[in-house]
Image (cartoon, rainbow, N blue to C red):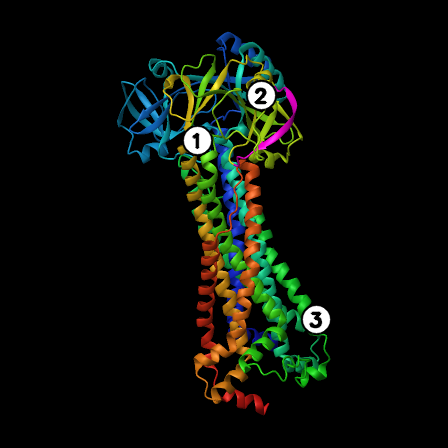
Amino acid sequence: MTLQKKIQRSVKKNLSFYLTGSILTAITVMLLVGAVTVSGSLYHCFDAYFAETKIEDAEFATLSEIPEDEMEQLKEQYDVTIEKQQYQDLSYQGTRLRLFAETGEMDLPTVTEGRKIEAEDEILLTYRYAKANGIAVGDTMELAGKTFRVCGLGMKPDYAIMLREFSDSIPDKDGFGIGILSKEAIKSLGAGMEYYSVRYGDKEKETAFRTEIYEKYGTVEYVERKANTRISLIYQEADDLVAEFSLYCPIILVVVIAVIAMVLARMVKREGKTIGTLLALGCRKKELVRHYMVYGMIPAFAGDIVGILLCIPFSRAFCSFYFGDAEYIDYVVKMPWKFIGIVLLIPIVVYGLVSDLVLRGVLKQEIVPLLKGMQKEKTPKLLNGSSAKLSLIYNIRSVVLNGFRSITLVVGIAIATLCIVLGGSFQDAYDNLLEEKVPYAMLGGQYEYGFTSYQTENPYGGNAVFDVSFGAAQDDSRFNLIGYEEENDLADLKTEDGKALNYGGYYMTSSAAKQYGIRAGDTFSFYNTVTMKESTVVISGIVKNDILTLVLTGKENAAELLGRPAEEYNVIISKDKLDIPANLLKKAASLEDYRNMVKNLSATAGIVLKLLKVLGVLIAVLIVTMISGMIAEESSRNISMLKVLGYRDREVQKFVFTSNHLLVPAGFILGVPLGYLTAYAMICAMAKSSGMFMSLPVKADTLLYSFVFVALAYFVALAVSGRKCRKVEMTESLRSMSE
């Protein structure tokens, strides 16, 4: 009972410690639980949505149309569901609208507002597009000379992420949308694009099915669901979110563990007489260990409670952000209670073990020294006889004699700096990508035109090439192989060492080389996603391009891999804008599109980067406040003596806290390289999924504002800690002398 009465008094006396530990623990719990909650919610909601709408397993395009009777035979023979998809791209009020024929067997559109199509003159629009462009249910639209009435708003499931092309990574949320029309209405608009969607009843028959459609109908493209970024990107984002936030949590826990160990050791030493008295009265050391462990566990319990309370609005906010492109889904924030239970136990177990180890070490002393208050103390012999200023001697001794405290402050500032530098360096990486790498994204071209089918004549200009997706044998990921004409005007087609390409060989972009771990002279195995035929080639050199994952070769080599005539092509790359009939094109991209993509990516990432900087400043303020408070408390006798000698409060604070001036820069210097190393590791991890490698420039202005942030946080913390110095009375020194 006596021991329990001490807890409240001790908590009040060490309030800064408990606040620091609790807040940092709460942040850790909030980030980790929030990330897993959002990820789990994304998986759960989209899995259910895709199952309900009968999402395709793959889509493919063929040179010749599959007749209805033969399609029925294929369905029966290979246990598949096949459905033709028809669409047409139109411009509408400065936006791109892709019109699809309604489907009945898979990729079923959903309706959020209004109703499904019931007449030939009705259209169902994607929700986000309609809202962004001021279109409501009941409005009319003029499309290709015909009038359509908007009957409903919803979504097409195979466009869960609104990407115009598979190669895009950022959706055009407002400028690109989907419209669903009846099959009769689509036909009335004229010729459009056609492809087939497929669902497998028996996945074992997939290879045989793919082989037959290639041999009979000439498959030109086959895209599995996992390679379809419109479907798979949402899962990739969910996984990346967990990976990113999971990185921060151990970092914060290290700081809290160091703080707990330091404070507990200090607390036990300070209460030596009390502990000695309790031991003399028959209290066992095990009881004292359990008692003082309570102090170490308070931040764990308090942080757990606050973290769980915070993770709910945090998860909802992030879910709203990630589901912002999918308002059509009636999503539910699904709390992973089993995982939450494990996360809540981590601080309790870790802090408990740290507390136990520290306390057992401190309580090894005998009873008599504890009773007399004669615990072994470090004698300040350092710089004895030195002619240096008293304040300098005092602060150097403070740093050296309180080594663990000093290390904790340095580590805390280093971690705060890491977070701030991480946020700034990532922004620099995006800026560098935009300024230095995007201009060369098209390997010397400015415009790219993709055709709906293979072409033989080129009356348009530019460089006619093969541009086809292949699968890497080592990890089943996708890359594009480009087959160039021997004579072209794309001046940037040179290796990293400045050599011109020999189109009889094979080359990789630096992005692909990094992703697959390939160097010049290595072999590389890949397969045709249409025919499933595997090939192995020798990579002759690396072409500098960190944005696109490509293999480059001549048209003859590409034609052989594709099994097509070398005079054909399916893409034109040009330095100038070309006049090509829209009905022939599958896609039309420009260098400006890449710029906009990177800008959108940077803007999206900016939210997390700002959060990192705020987190860094918060850690710096909390750590410095706590450490400075401890210094003020331990130096109360010295502070009192200085006041007796006539020192003013400002002078006293300068004298006592100057030791921090030595440690904060050390923490900053340590944190800078740690921040850049962490950023580089994250860039490498992102590159594995996106294929886009960003450089990490070290900019002076980033280092400067990082230091400014740390310095401001430091001085704010000192201002808060200065209150303890001002509260120390002159009589404190007299009381200590009488003891």
- Left or right of 109? Residue 493 is right
Could you tell me how far apart the alpha carbons at marks 2 and 1 are, in whole angstroms?
28 Å
Q: Which residue does the numbered mark 2 point to in the structure image?
A: 201
Q: Which residue does the numbered mark 3 point to in the structure image?
A: 361
Mark sitting earlier along the chain (2/1): 1
**Extent of the magenta region:** 532-546
Q: Which of the image's four quarters has the N terminus? A: bottom right
Disc on res. 163? 1
Badge 3 vs badge 1, beta-carbon distance below 8 Å: no
Can the viewer see residue 336 in this picture?
Answer: no
Magenta-colored segment: predominant secondary structure: strand
Looking at the rendered image, the disc whose residue lies closer to the viewer, 2 or 1, is 1
Could you tell me how far apart the alpha carbons at marks 3 and 1 are, in whole angstroms?
60 Å
Q: Position of residue 268 (x, y in %)?
A: 63, 75
Does 28 lie within the magenta span? no
As displayed, is residue 665 above or below residue 116? below
Q: Position of residue 391 (x, y in %)?
A: 53, 80
